[in-house]
Image (tube, rainbow, N blue to C red):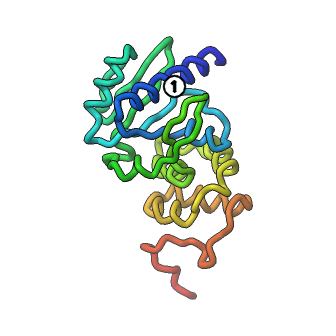
């Protein structure tokens, strides 16, 4: 486990440095962006966002820097791989293209001694909740992240962002029940669902 984590950390740094040196807009996202802000360290891969318009250049830059870049079957990311570990470089998330303004919201922070853009906590949590569906709905992984980042997150923005995702709405209700976040005054019901009829 530790060896794999060390390899991911090394890949994370090398990927960031290669993109920085080539002036490719990017931002650390996902589990490692949460880790930088106080959440538990992920057990697997690291993730970066690049604008869709920069996808080809990003892949070329990474390959030219000597990294092993693999094109998976999915057409929305490339993988940087080494010793069974990998870093994902994505230009679409939840089916939506990454725009330059998304990456521009990132804040430069030190990550493993390398200064790099890191997505804000609100975007990290909203992205994780937006990815929930009936095939992946692991609340146990999300709870420690939500607890660790709760004071850094604008929960009203998260609620608005994921309002159409029933799995995410249920998770937010769970956070309210557990006292992790404050409930919204109106109960936080889905705006597109009318209230139940009175008897």
- Compared across the picture, whether 186 is left or right of 22 comes to right
Q: Position of residue 120 (x, y in %)?
A: 53, 50
Q: Position of residue 6 (x, y in %)?
A: 60, 19
> Measuring 52% from the left and 55% from the top, which residue is drawn there?
168
User: Looking at the picture, does residue 67 appear above or below residue 174?
Assistant: above
Task: Using the image as rendered, state which of residue 36 and residue 160 is in the foreground.
Answer: 36
Task: Using the image as rendered, state which of residue 66 and residue 40 is in the foreground.
Answer: 66
As drawn, the residue found furthest toward the top would be 83
**Quadrant of the drawing holding the C terminus:** bottom right
Task: Using the image as rendered, state which of residue 173 and residue 149 is in the foreground.
Answer: 149
Rendered image quadrant of residue 38: top right
- Compared across the picture, whether 50 is left or right of 165 comes to left
> Measuring 60% from the left and 32% from the top, which residue is drawn there?
42
Q: Is mark 1 on a helix, strand or loop?
A: helix
The residue singled out by tag 1 in the image is 13
- Compared across the picture, whether 143 is left or right of 44 comes to right
Q: Position of residue 164 (x, y in %)?
A: 43, 62
Q: Mark 1 Cα within 10 Å, few/some/many (few <14, many 20+)?
A: some
């Amino acid at each position: 486990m530790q060896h794999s984590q060390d390899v991911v950390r090394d890949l994370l740094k090398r990927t960031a440095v290669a993109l920085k040196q080539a002036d490719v807009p990017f931002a650390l996202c996902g589990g490692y962006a949460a880790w930088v802000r106080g959440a538990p360290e992920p057990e697997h891969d690291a993730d970066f966002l690049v604008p869709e318009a920069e996808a080809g250049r990003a892949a070329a830059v990474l390959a030219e820097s000597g990294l092993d870049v693999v094109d998976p079957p999915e057409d929305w990311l490339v993988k940087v791989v080494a010793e069974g570990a990998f870093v994902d470089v994505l230009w679409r998330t939840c089916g939506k293209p990454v725009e330059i303004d998304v990456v521009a919201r990132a804040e430069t922070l030190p990550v493993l001694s390398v200064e790099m853009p890191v997505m804000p906590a609100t975007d990290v949590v909203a992205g994780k909740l937006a990815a929930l569906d009936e095939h992946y709905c692991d609340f146990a992984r999300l709870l420690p992240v939500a607890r660790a980042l709760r004071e850094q997150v604008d929960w009203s923005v998260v609620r608005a962002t994921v309002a159409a995702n029933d799995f995410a709405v249920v998770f937010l209700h769970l956070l309210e029940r557990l006292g992790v976040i404050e409930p919204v005054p109106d109960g936080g019901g889905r705006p597109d669902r009318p209230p139940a009829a009175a008897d």
